[in-house]
Image (cartoon, helix red, strand yellow):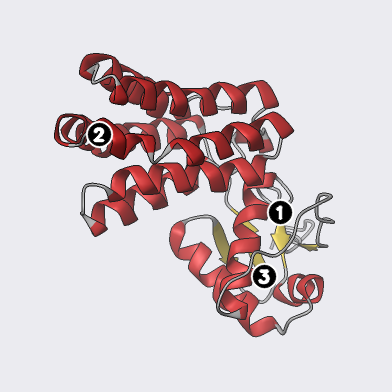
Amino acid sequence: MEQGTAEQPPRARAWVPAQPGSAVPRRHSVRGQVLAALRQALAGGELLPGEVYSAPALAERYGVSATPVREAMQQLAGEGAVEVVPNRGFRVAERSPRDLAELAEVRAMLEVPAIVRLARALPPERWEELRPLAAAGVAAAARGDRAGYAEADHSFHHAMISLTGNRRLTEVTGDLLRRTHWAGPGGLRRRTAELLADASEHTALLDALIAQEYAVAERIAREHVSAARHPH
């Protein structure tokens, strides 16, 4: 039998302190609160790709029992955000440039045709109603608040796609969008300038939709979704 050093099991990483101003979002249940906070931590880069985090450590961070943390992490595992490491905890998933490209491709297939159909079906005033959501994204981006921008971005796209009345489409596109906000290859995160550029496209898209410039709206929507294929 060959001699050698046994492979060491992954070590659970201690919780990274939250960024100033971050807080657990209000939800109807403890599990919902933890799930929302973990999503913010993923988007904000507090949970690092490739690192293993234990449920008890996360539970201590939030002042809750380990059960709602495990339940929330199991849901994130189902979404592909983390992987279960038996008897250790959960490893944050690492994404490759190919992962980003495939996410962008699927989003373009689903979102762009939906926006094109909506552009010709809805009056300008319906698009005006989305202005506050676009403005919230710009404000979060200007602060360099990655987690805040991720939530604002999700709210904007959710509101837009929900106008189709198709609940399954809204659910699927929302899940795909969340995946684009996890830290990129090597743990790279988007810079403030990149967040602002992304947020400004929401405003430009609304401008085109309100002006009923359908070809321009389609181009902006396609470029906006396709930009997510590039690692940040």
In the rendered structure, which disc, 3 or 1, sits on the residue that comes first in sequence? 1
Relative to the observer, which residue lies in front, 85 or 168? Answer: 168
Residue 61 sits above or below residue 66 on the image:
above
Task: Name the N-terminal-most of marks 2 and 1.
Answer: 1
Residue 200 lies, in percent from the top left, at: 52, 23
Name the amino acid type tagged 2. Ile
Residue, disc 1: 51
Distance between mark 2 and mark 1 Cα atoms: 38 Å
Decide: is 154 above or below 52. Answer: above
Q: Quadrant of the N terminus?
A: bottom right
Residue at the location (41% across, 39% down)?
130
Question: Is residue 32 at all visible to an observer of this figure?
Answer: yes
* Mark 2 crowd level (few <14, some 14–19, many ≥20, 10 Å Cα): many
Q: In the rendered view, does 122 fall on the left or right side of 147?
A: left
The residue under the point 46% across, 34% down is 100
- Please tell me which residue is depicted at 38% across the width and 41% down the height of the picture: 129
Q: Residues within 10 Å of mark 3 (few under 14, many from 20)?
A: many
Which residue does the numbered mark 2 point to in the structure image?
A: 115
* Cα distance between the residues tagged 2 and 3: 40 Å
Which is more N-terminal, label 3 or label 2? 3
Assign a secondary structure to mark 3: strand
Could you tell me how many numbered marks the image carries? 3
For image coordinates 49% across by 35% down, the residue present is 134
Image location of residue 229, percent across then percent down: 45, 27
Q: Position of residue 145 (x, y in %)?
A: 70, 39
Dividing the picture into quadrants, the one containing residue 184 is: top right
Of 209 and 48, which appears nearest the observer?
209
On screen, residue 123 versus residue 78, left or right, reads left
* Cα distance in 3D space between marks 3 and 1: 10 Å
Residue type at the position of mark 3: Gly
